[in-house]
Image (cartoon, rainbow, N blue to C red):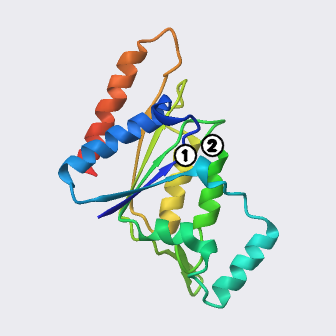
């Protein structure tokens, strides 16, 4: 079993609450899956740039000529080949850091992550489940735009199982933040056991 952890955290090391929650999730999941392989991609270290018009023209030409092994598609092949996917990202300006959106641009490749069968688009990703873990300084509510967007990406790419945990209210002084964190950890552990 191959798990891909897409680390979209902005802080270094364990200063990131989101990364800590992701680590709790992976540690719990690995208890019942000791033979699994976890591959981590740290987006802030990748230096990915948004795709330009020239990039998309080149990508389309490579797809048209069947050159899907080109290095331009490394991220797409890695994502499409994973058995499970974990994405960790902090709440950031109504969704998540822009580097995650740029990453999604790079993985959405026709012929790898999805394809067209006639006029119908079908997902080609192998993963059955994608877990999205987020932390937020305030309260984001049920209709958090980042989770809605990632659920739509899963649908497009053929990943049937989408789950989401958010540790909310982490910076609000007037509430019991330690309890908020404990509740988020409990939900994370529960999700890991069912993943």
The residue shown at (42%, 64%) is 159
Relative vertical location of residue 19 with respect to residue 181 in this rendering, above or below? below
Relative vertical location of residue 77 with respect to residue 63 in this rendering, above or below? above
Residues tagged 1 and 2 counted as in contact (Cβ below 8 A): yes
Instruction: Please tell me which of labels 1 and 2 falls first in the chain.
Output: 1
The residue shown at (61%, 55%) is 46
Q: Residues within 10 Å of mark 1 (few under 14, many from 20)?
A: many
Q: Would you name the residue on which mark 1 appears? A: 8
The residue shown at (50%, 72%) is 77
Residue in the foreground of this view, choosing between 140 and 25 = 25
Q: How many marks?
A: 2
Residue 40 placed where, x, y %?
45, 54
Residue 92 placed where, x, y %?
62, 36
Left or right: residue 136 versus residue 97 is: left
The residue shown at (72%, 58%) is 50
Q: Which mark is residue 97?
A: 2
Quadrant location of the N terminus in the rendered image? bottom left
Residue in the foreground of this view, choosing between 78 and 171 = 78
Q: Residues within 10 Å of mark 2 (few under 14, many from 20)?
A: some
Residue in the foreground of this view, choosing between 79 and 111 = 79
Circle 2 sits in a helix, a strand or a loop, which is it?
A: loop
Query: Disc 1 to disc 2, how far (Cα)?
Result: 7 Å
């Amino acid at each position: 079993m191959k798990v891909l952890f897409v680390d979209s955290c902005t802080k270094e090391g364990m200063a990131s609450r989101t990364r800590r929650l992701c680590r709790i999730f992976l540690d719990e999941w690995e208890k019942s899956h000791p033979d699994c392989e976890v591959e981590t991609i740290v987006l802030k270290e990748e230096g990915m740039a948004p795709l330009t018009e020239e990039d998309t023209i080149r990508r389309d030409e490579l797809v048209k000529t069947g050159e899907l092994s080109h290095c331009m598609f490394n991220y797409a092949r890695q994502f499409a080949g994973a058995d499970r996917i974990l994405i960790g990202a902090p709440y950031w300006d109504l969704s998540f850091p822009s580097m995650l959106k740029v990453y999604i641009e790079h993985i959405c490749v026709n012929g790898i992550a999805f394809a067209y069968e006639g006029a119908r688009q079908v997902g080609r990703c192998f993963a059955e489940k994608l877990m999205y873990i987020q932390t937020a300084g305030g309260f984001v509510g049920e209709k958090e735009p980042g989770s809605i967007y990632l659920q739509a990406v899963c649908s497009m790419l053929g990943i049937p199982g989408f789950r989401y945990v958010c540790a909310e209210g982490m910076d609000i002084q007037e509430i019991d933040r330690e309890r908020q964190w404990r509740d988020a950890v409990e939900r994370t552990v529960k999700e890991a056991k069912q993943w």
